[in-house]
Image (cartoon, rainbow, N blue to C red):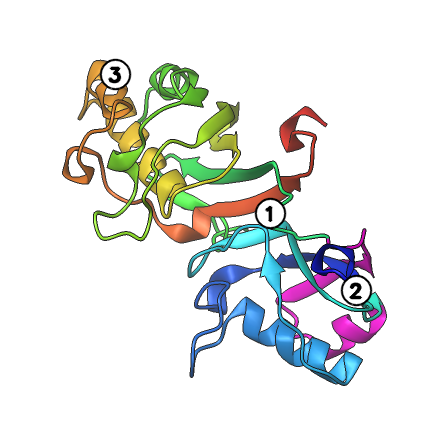
Amino acid sequence: MAADEQERSKLVIAYDGTAFKGWAVQPGLRTVEGELLRALKIALRRDVALTVAGRTDTGVHAEAQVASHDGQPATVKALNALLPSDIAVSVSELAEPGFCARREATSRAYIYALAVGPVRPVADRTRTVWWAKPVDVDLLKACAALLPGQHDMTAFTPTQTLHTYFKPTILSARWVESGNRLEFHIEANWFLRHMNRILVGTMIEVASGDRSLESFEKLLAGASRLDAGPTARPHGLRLVGVGYGKEVFSS
């Protein structure tokens, strides 16, 4: 059977990234992929290799991560019985022959959550970053309005990188305000490492009066990482969906 005709299975996964050292397997460390591979091996009685739509870093959460593996699927019930309480599988099904969660994904969508004001969040403190200083929400929204399209995002990823191409296509970006809660919604065909968190850290500098909107716009033309702002904390970020031919935030 040709490689593109092989049986493939699809998983949709949610996880709280607080206690994980990111998605990818790392020797001696607790990772999301490591826990899933352990559960799949028990449920299927064989080893599998997972392909994920978008790797997440240490502390980053997911609501609808997508992964694929070869062969028949395990049942959702079996997997959730084997997985720890900070991971849950909502879908485990046979996909189209040759399906690849990464290669066929056309977009990834993320939300970054901030609680702004003098009182720190308590109930959702593991998923929301507290920002005590005042921010100009209009300036945050003006920054986001500059993002859709294709830009050289070199300033928004670590200098030491395996990336050789720095121009993802940003499909949509906006800040959503609800009381003292601010959420940055962004969707792109792919993301550079730490890109969302550096964007948030830099936009907060603009909204706090520490950087001009014009200087932020100049960063989108391929500036140095040293010219951009700090990397925002990871626990405010969550992957909310993966698009396959249809944008997540348009559905």
- Tell me which numbered mark, 3 or 2, is placed earlier along the sequence: 2
Task: Out of 112 and 108, give the one closest to the viewer.
Answer: 108
Disc 1 residue type (three-letter): Arg
45 sits to left or right of 131: right
Disc 2 residue type (three-letter): Met
The residue to which callout 1 is attached is 103
Residue 211, quarter of picture: top left
Image location (x, y in percent) of residue 79 = 76, 72
The residue to which callout 2 is attached is 1
Residue found 47% across the figure and 52% down from its top: 125
Q: Which residues are magenta?
A: 77-98
127 sits to left or right of 101: left
Q: Residues within 10 Å of mark 2 (few under 14, many from 20)?
A: few
Residue found 67% across the figure and 74% down from its top: 48
Question: SS at mark 3?
Answer: helix
In the picture, which quadrant includes the N terminus? bottom right
> With respect to residue 39, does 225 lie above or below?
above
Q: Is residue 119 visible in this depiction of the protein?
A: no
Question: SS at mark 2?
Answer: loop
Image location (x, y in percent) of residue 76 = 82, 66
Image location (x, y in percent) of residue 88 = 70, 63
The residue to which callout 3 is attached is 213
Circle nearer the viewer, 3 or 1: 1
- Distance of label 2 from label 1 (alpha carbons): 20 Å
Disc 3 residue type (three-letter): Leu
Q: Is residue 91 magenta?
A: yes
Circle nearer the viewer, 2 or 1: 2
